[in-house]
Image (cartoon, helix red, strand yellow):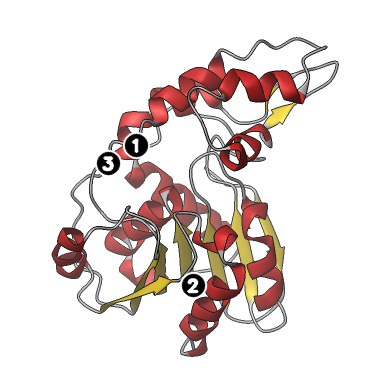
């Protein structure tokens, strides 16, 4: 599958992969910061943003999407940055096609299975009525039980089209059906020997101490950095802190 890409800048390629229910433009500030020196592509993952909708969201499938998209753009090797679901996709890409990944930055996720209740969130989203007179406040209220945090509800509702032709821009039924795969992980050949940086939010609990040996087994060169004053959405919670880490990551790219 060829994914929708937002492309800016010239030079060595850097690729951004967003997380679940996100979109390419979530990395807009980081993309703009790197564009004067690099060719930066932010991709909409399948069933997200402006990319095609299709059943099946295993990490090997999504890694193959990224590979096909990069090759379609004439890119055979790139630095890859992925957050959460995008981080798992980036890991899968590096493990399956290591020659394509010059260096790897994974933001706040580990190559392990999780149980984060995304099935409840997807179900609540599916229950929102597609009425032309539906207001944002009504939609927000309908999500409140499943999603207590107002900021996350606002993030999710970026994907909803209000007005005379209401509906979800994302492939929500396909995403909902794929939650077990998205929260899971599959064993892939490895290891990936290239430079790898695993960034966590200091206030996040997604990457636990017991996950580090698993990461090091698959990514022997892995280094670990925690960004202060950040939870799971590191690049949104502390943009300056994330950007500082990102700048150090790309400084050795060449």
User: For residue 153, what is the image quadrant?
Assistant: top right
Which residue is depicted at the point 52% across and 76% down? 246
Horizontal and vertical percent position of residue 148: 51, 32
Q: Which mark is residue 116?
A: 1
Work out whether mark 3 precedes mark 2 in sequence or the reverse, and give the earlier one: 2
Q: CA distance from mark 1 to mark 2?
A: 30 Å
Q: Which mark is residue 78?
A: 2
Q: Which mark is residue 157?
A: none
User: For residue 201, what is the image quadrant?
Assistant: bottom left
In this view, 95 is above or below 33: above
Q: Is residue 48 left or right of residue 96?
A: right
Horizontal and vertical percent position of residue 224: 31, 75
The answer, for residue 153, to whether it is visible in the render is yes
The answer, for residue 51, to whether it is visible in the render is no
Q: CA distance from mark 1 to mark 3?
A: 6 Å
The secondary element bearing badge 1 is classed as: loop
Asked whether 192 or 85 is in front, the reply is 85
Q: Is residue 99 left or right of residue 32?
A: left
The secondary element bearing badge 2 is classed as: strand
Asked whether 100 or 152 is in front, the reply is 152
Q: Are marks 1 and 3 in contact (CB under 8 Å)?
A: yes
Horizontal and vertical percent position of residue 191: 19, 68
Q: Which residue is mark 3?
A: 114
Asked whether 193 or 116 is in front, the reply is 116
User: For residue 109, what is the image quadrant?
Assistant: bottom left
Which residue is depicted at the point 61% across and 59% down? 42
Q: CA distance from mark 3 to mark 2?
A: 28 Å
Asked whether 208 or 34 is in front, the reply is 208
In this view, 56 is above or below 221: above
In this view, 95 is above or below 155: below
Which residue is depicted at the point 71% across and 18% down? 138
Q: In the image, which is nearer the foreground, mark 1 or mark 2?
A: 1
């Amino acid at each position: 599958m060829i994914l929708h890409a937002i492309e800016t800048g010239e030079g060595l390629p850097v690729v951004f992969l967003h997380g679940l229910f996100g979109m390419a433009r979530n990395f807009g500030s980081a993309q703009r910061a790197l564009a004067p020196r690099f060719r930066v592509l932010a991709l909409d993952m399948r069933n997200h943003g402006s990319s095609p909708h299709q059943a099946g969201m295993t990490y090997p499938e999504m890694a193959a999407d990224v590979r096909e998209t990069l090759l379609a753009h004439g890119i055979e090797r790139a630095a890859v940055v992925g957050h959460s679901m995008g981080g798992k996709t980036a890991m899968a890409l590096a493990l399956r096609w290591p020659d394509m990944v010059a260096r790897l930055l994974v933001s706040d996720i580990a190559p392990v299975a999780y149980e984060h209740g995304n099935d409840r969130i997807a179900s609540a989203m599916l229950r929102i009525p597609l009425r032309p007179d539906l207001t944002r406040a009504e939609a927000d209220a309908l999500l409140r039980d499943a999603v207590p945090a107002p900021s996350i509800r606002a993030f999710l509702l970026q994907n909803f089209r209000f007005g005379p032709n209401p509906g979800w821009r994302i492939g929500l039924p396909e995403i909902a059906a794929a939650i077990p795969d998205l929260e899971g992980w599959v064993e892939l050949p490895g290891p990936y020997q290239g430079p790898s940086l695993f960034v966590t939010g200091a206030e996040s609990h997604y990457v636990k101490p017991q996950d580090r040996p698993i990461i090091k087994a698959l990514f022997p060169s892995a280094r670990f950095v925690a960004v202060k004053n950040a939870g799971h959405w590191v690049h949104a919670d502390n943009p300056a802190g994330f950007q500082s880490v990102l700048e150090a990551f790309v400084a050795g790219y060449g």
